[in-house]
Image (spheres, rainbow, N blue to C red):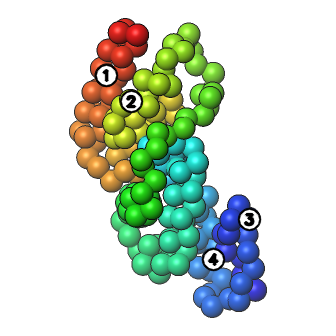
Amino acid sequence: MRRIPGAGAFVDVEATEPVAAEAGFDGFARDVGDRLRRVLVARCGVHDGCDLAAEALLYAWEHWDRVREMDNPAGYLYGVALTSGRKRRRWARPAPFPPELPHEPSGPTDPGLGRALARLNASQRTCVVLVHVFGWSYADVAEVIDAPVTSVRNHVHRGLRNLRQQLEGS
């Protein structure tokens, strides 16, 4: 019997691959899964982001022979998750964001920040949240969303500019 990720737990199934492949996937899922979930939550909201991250990891498990050989598997799985989301047409509703930030902010937080973040386009919101809330480097964000560092820098710059305009205007 072998354990594979299921709906919030692990499910036992018949072993069809060597045990070494399972250990490799478990490490991969721990390392990449958390980062992928954060990126997708920042882009799509809590519920959809967690669902899409789980679907992307399931895809990675099902195609592990191919995924483990990739140069940037996290970026590839990010694309898989976004495609899955588009297929389900779940982007029509606004993305719900957590009521609290993952860590205590260093200064006062504007009460309209959540609404202002929701008004940013998905790329700007994703980059701003990952860089300024989770403390990721531009290179880390670029790797996971499979984009150049200059694009991440532009999304952060434009996103912060839009946030300032929205918060000053409200």
Quadrant in the picture for residue 3: bottom right
Q: Is residue 15 above or below residue 136?
A: below
Q: Residue at x 37, y 50 (%)?
A: 145
Residue type beneath disc 3: Ala
Mark 2 and mark 3 lie on one chain; the one further toward the N terminus is: 3
Mark 2 and mark 1 lie on one chain; the one further toward the N terminus is: 2
The secondary element bearing badge 1 is classed as: helix
Crowd band around label 2 with a 10 angstrom C-alpha radius: few (<14), some (14–19), many (20+): some
Q: Residue at x 57, y 61 (%)?
A: 54
Residue type beneath disc 4: Glu
Residue 72 drawn at (x, y percent)? 38, 61
From where the camera sits, is residue 22 visible?
yes
Quadrant in the picture for residue 163: top left
Mark 1 and mark 3 lie on one chain; the one further toward the N terminus is: 3
The secondary element bearing badge 2 is classed as: helix
State if disc 1 and disc 2 touch (CB < 8 Å). Answer: yes
Residue 66 drawn at (x, y percent)? 42, 78
Residue type beneath disc 1: Asn
Tag on residue 119?
A: 2
Q: Residue at x 34, y 41 (%)?
A: 123
The answer for how far apart the CA atoms under marks 2 and 3 are is 34 Å
| Camera-side mark, 2 or 3 | 2
- Quadrant in which the N terminus is drawn: bottom right
The secondary element bearing badge 3 is classed as: loop
The answer for how far apart the CA atoms under marks 2 and 4 are is 41 Å
State if disc 4 and disc 3 touch (CB < 8 Å). Answer: no
Q: Which residue is mark 1?
A: 162
The answer for how far apart the CA atoms under marks 3 and 4 are is 16 Å
Residue type beneath disc 2: Arg
Instruction: Say how many tags the image has.
Output: 4
| Camera-side mark, 1 or 4 | 1
